[in-house]
Image (tube, coloured by chain):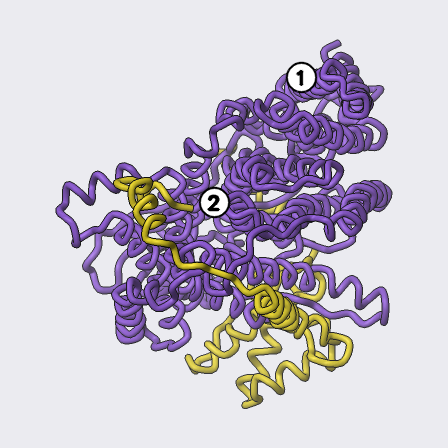
Chain colours: A purple, B yellow
Amino acid sequence: MIVELGAFALILALVLAGLTTALATAGRLRLSPVLAGAGGGALIASAAATALAFAALIYAFAVSDFSVSNVALNSHTDKPMLYKVAAAWGSHEGSLVLWCLVMTGFGGALALARGLPFGLKTSSVAVQGALSTMFLAFAVFTSNPFTRLDPAPVQGASLNPLLQDPALAFHPPLLYAGYVGFSVCFSLAVAALIEKRVDPAWGRWVRPWALASWAFLTVGILLGSFWAYYELGWGGWWFWDPVENASFMPWLAGAALLHSAIVTERRGALAGWTVFLAILAFTFSMLGAFLVRSGVLTSVHAFAVDPERGMMLLAILGVAAGAAFILFAFRAPAIRSGAAFAPISREGALVLNNLFLTAAAATVLLGTLYPLILEGISGATISVGPPYFNATFTPLMVVACLILPAGPLMAWKRGDLKGALQRLWLAAGLAVVAAFAAFLLFEPKKALAAAGLGVGAWLILGALAEVGVRTKAFRAPLGETLRRGRNLPLGAWGMTLAHAGLGVFILGAVVETSFKAEAAAAVPLGGVVSSGPWRVRLDAVEVIEGPNYLAEQGRLTVMPLDGRAVERVVTAERRFFPAGGQTTTEVGLDFRGLDDVYVVMGERARSEDGQQAWTVRVYYNPWARLIFLGPAIMALGGVLSLMDRRLRVGAGSRRKTEVKA
Amino acid sequence: MRRLASLTAALALAAGAVMAEPPPAPDRPLPDAAQEARARALFGDIRCVVCQHESIADSPAGIAADMRRLVREEIAAGKSDQAVRQDLVRRYGDYVLFQPPVRAGTWLLWFGPFALVLGAGAVFVWRARRRRVEVQPLTAEEERALAELTAGSDEAERG
């Protein structure tokens, strides 16, 4: 019964979303606040109906109702409750309902936003309703999660056990909040084009949505990356895999959007460009959904590979993005470009930021789609992987990072580059010292890695220097500095944190990539594998029984080579899930300060003298902690900026919490 | 104890069922540390030909182990990194390298990003030059008014 209710609610949500567009459009054309308000109300009701459908789906998973095909295919009675619930968004159908929930939820929040002018608000609600209609129709007609099975199986087929992991349970909701949150930016951009009005106020409207979406996406990608790091058991955290790229493109476009919206808000400039980015960010989100769900690209974690659904998604992408870009092409020339500015200015710095972020996004796009396009055109097959991105993406980002600290120290309109550099000389000097120190201290000596560390240090020190300048640190009495620090708007602290967080990430990424060590050997009980400054001894192997798996659990002791740190015991497992017949690894992670000692239990083997042995892999990942800490700091910066009073006017922070719920 | 034995049997059986082939022997690193380091660096750039976007450094597949052995053998035989790559490309095609070749068909891929930065940068500079910023110095009176307005609140003026 509840399942039927869910199915009904999903259809109701679709009807309400369609109604939203009809009512809001009529309201806009007849300038009727009543009709427009009804449109907004329909979108809120659609969000409520989608939430009901989603709740019904979660309920079906929680009680293991295997008469529902989606539950039977993706769940199992032996699964722990958290993963039964999380399985509701672990499949194509369920995750699509989540997608629609975020879309209508953010849309409902948009409808509740106060202070937006009538035209912009009504038009954007209409556009958001149209987007929701397309995706809800896709869910109802091709991917209905409530389809019944008759007869119902007694047991489910279980979800891919790789996904049975806390990080992955929360990864999709956060990722989607980011991905789909950009749909509001898209709707506001299209509405601005329809209204032929892009002014600083519009920049202010779009920014909180972009900030919230970007912060969600940052945490979502972070969790996904952390999951890949410790669940796949490969010791890596980013593989430039097409699906990872699919989430990274909207992130880059969103980061560019955040920055260009500042220029539009503060100076009225770059208005057309900001509109373009707002459309682009969500276009990348839709492209990502298409790439992941259509199976056109092979990837470790592509799911629900189905060409027919892929065609539908491609059609939605084509209609939504196509219409938006055509509208943009016709209306953009009429957008006033706002106040002029000199190349050396805050605006100029932000233009450079946008230039590099957009080029980086284009690089990721090219690298992801090129093999596909080339094969389609010439039949030649190529692979694009880490070496390509290291040669293209990385230098672009390095240049962007070198410029970055100077940007916030520039004045609007016409900046003083010499003045900015004078304030940064200490940070620059210390960064160079850090690079030299890194070159001398890290073994083996790697000049490029040392330079990379210098870049990371430059970002962190540059961010600190900027706060120092604003608060007159060391130049005014301490009390004065503290007072100025307190008075700095949250947005300023948010920016400082986000930029420093990028630096922290770079430090971790550079050191981990350059100085990690890996060793593997088949060892009997008592055998030792050495990696970097650590030795790992296999003490015992036990067979244990989990809720829905069997595992061989190794107990291993991590010992320092030089004897200067304490020994610690970690457990690593190799799990077998009878329901689906898959094997997974549970990595043993020993956190040593910033470093990880990462232990993987492998298959049984025979050692050289014929003894029973196990393959043990040990990775030494120096500074790996910073790789995940950095993006967390960046997201925190985004949240701080979002809480800034200046953004709260009209576009309240209250709405963000509603969407999360 | 019997339960444990049956579990162990189930695990062993399962392991057999999951992998149609016997588990590959763990890699035997090359005795020469420098050669082994070169081999490892190469593994990351070579695609496991039956896998989904995995390098042979990461893949647990049997063929990845075979490819690793092949690379190690060639390096031990004194071949350069470039020669090893060429051998692999001869055997499996361009597809096997994560670094696509630079040729007419991939110019856009390789040079597109940089062309975009240079092109867009040039357009920006050209437009900025066309629209010179006229900044009139403030009159003494305006300066005074400005100082009054911003007194004590200059830190609020942030972006």
Q: Nearer the viewer, mark 2 or mark 1?
A: 1
Q: Chain of mark 2?
A: A
Per the image, label 2 sits on a secondary structure element best described as strand
From what the image shows, is residue A378 above or below residue B10? below
Where residue A458 sits in the image (x, y, percent)? 35, 63
Q: Which mark is on residue A590?
A: none
Near-viewer residue (A256 or A508): A256
| Residue located 75% across and 32% down the image | A127
From what the image shows, is residue A586 above or below residue A297? above
Disc 2 residue type (three-letter): Glu
Where residue A185 sits in the image (x, y, percent)? 64, 39
Same subunit under labels 2 and 1?
A: yes
Image side of residue A403 versus residue B154, left or right: right
Task: Give the residue at mark 1.
Answer: A48
Near-viewer residue (A530 or A312): A312
Where residue A433 sits in the image (x, y, percent)? 26, 71
Disc 1 residue type (three-letter): Ala
Near-viewer residue (A490 or B10): A490
Gap in Å between the C-alphas at discs 2 and 1? 42 Å
Contact between labelled residues 1 and 2, with CB atoms less than 8 Å apart: no
